Image (cartoon, rainbow, N blue to C red):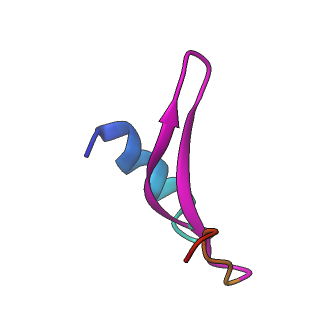
Amino acid sequence: MSDTVERLKAALADRYAIEREIGAGGMATVYLAEDLKHERKPHGE
């Protein structure tokens, strides 16, 4: 896993569980994550 993803996981660890990258483009990268505070799983799970 890249250093950027590891830093993102560390920064958001108390709120989100990053599962995987689902898309990337010129302006952003989008990740699938679970909302830990509200116990919300990603759609489809």
From the top left corner, tell me how far across and down residue 32 is, in percent.
53, 56
Residue range highlighted in magenta? 17-38
Q: Is residue 36 left or right of residue 5?
A: right
Q: Is residue 19 left or right of residue 26?
A: left
* Location of residue 16 with respect to 7 vertically, above or below: below
Q: Pick the residue in front: 6 or 24.
A: 24
Picture quarter with the C terminus: bottom right
* Location of residue 34 with respect to 37 vertically, above or below: above
Identity of the residue drawn at 50% across and 37% down? 23
Q: Is residue 36 magenta?
A: yes
* Location of residue 20 with respect to 34 vertically, above or below: above
Q: Quadrant of residue 29?
A: top right
Q: Predominant secondary structure in magenta?
A: strand
Identity of the residue drawn at 68% across and 78% down? 40
From the top left corner, tell me how far across and down residue 19 is, in percent.
43, 62
Q: Pick the residue in front: 33 or 16.
A: 33
